[in-house]
Amino acid sequence: QEDKHFHQLLKVMTFMPEQTETNVRLLMAQNPNVSQIADFTTWSDIKKRKIKAKSKALKIILPNPQLERDESGKVILNAKGEPKIEKVTESVVSVFDESQTVGPSLKPSIVEEIPRDRALEIFQNLAQLSTHSIRFTEKPLMQDERDISFEHSWLISSQKEIFIQKGLDPKEALKALVQELVYQNNPDISGTPEFEKLKIEATTYLLLRRQRLETPPPSINNFSLSQEHLSNLLNQIQESSKLLGQNFDKQLKPKVVKNYEQMTPIDKNRKLTLKEKMEAAKNKESELAEAVDTSKKALGVEPHQAPQIYKVTKTQVN
């Protein structure tokens, strides 16, 4: 029962990285299947979805900072030129779940498996965030220079190297990498190795679900957690996944490709957004203009070497 409730909390937190653990619990008490929330204006004006008739708003609690003002009512600024906060109160805010709206689909479904080429693309991009070199090994390492041990990866911190087991299926390889990235970005190691591993695995679970990949969630059955300890754990998981998730989103954001020859098969099959198409058209116009200008200046053309699609990075595959 504890596991089931914990797993549902993590699922609800997946697409609410900005919400506190308290608000997640509050939302689940009102709608156990809540998935994604926004206020009326955001749904209608930004996300272009309509609120269903007779939908009952859900309530969350948000901080309401009160600005400090002088006698004339003018906002007082601090040394950095920022408004001074006199006090912070709390306000009850009305929101609606995605299930209470109709309109364009917001997100693709979360899947159990991921195509190999897509997994490789994500892996190569996320590997750039690692502060350690990444290698693959046929045989498990006999040592791991940390108290926490993972099933398919090992850390040799003295050499700044991470070893990931070779031959894993795409989902397991991605999970191994994300766990290592979470570990690197987990400076607050204050609990037991078992507790820290739970926190890392739960954060990994959230981050992979935000990439639409479902993996088995960690269990808390072997932990005796009070309500306060569970709340603290969830807050740490939420904060860690939010910060690292922002880095993931930046790293995985599709790049605008200038030339068709430079495109990978994945690029060629992916439909460009309107913004990307406009940017690509602008780049093409610049290339044509430059080519015309160059032809006026020289009779011959210097041999041109096409840029490499892949370059050597920290990730080394044996």
Image (cartoon, helix red, strand yellow):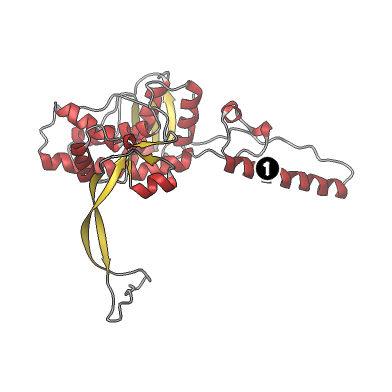
Identify the residue shown where x is 57% and y is 32%: 271
Q: Residue furthest bottom?
A: 71
Residue 133 in the figure: left or right of residue 88 = right
Q: Foreground: 164 or 36?
A: 36
How far from the left and from the top, in percent, is residue 239?
Answer: 29, 45
Residue 92, placed above or below residue 315: below
Residue under label 1: 281
Q: Foreground: 11 or 225?
A: 11
Q: Dot 1: within a 10 Å radius of its alpha carbon, few (fewer than 14), some, or many (20 or more) residues?
A: few
Identify the residue shown where x is 21% and y is 60%: 89
How far from the left and from the top, in percent, is residue 139?
Answer: 37, 19
Q: Residue furthest front?
A: 53
The number of callouts visible is 1
How far from the left and from the top, in percent, is residue 299?
Answer: 90, 44
**Residue flagged by tag 1: what amino acid is it?**
Ala
How far from the left and from the top, in percent, is residue 71?
Answer: 27, 81
Secondary structure, mark 1, is: helix
Q: Is residue 281 visible?
A: yes
Residue 263 picture quarter: top right
Residue 237 picture quarter: top left
Residue 243 picture quarter: top left
Residue 230 in the figure: left or right of residue 36 = left
Q: Residue furthest right?
A: 299
Identify the residue shown where x is 20% and y is 38%: 30
Identify the residue shown where x is 41% and y is 38%: 132
Q: Foreground: 128 or 256?
A: 256
Of the 4 image quadrants, the one containing the N terminus is top left
Q: Is residue 147 visible?
A: no
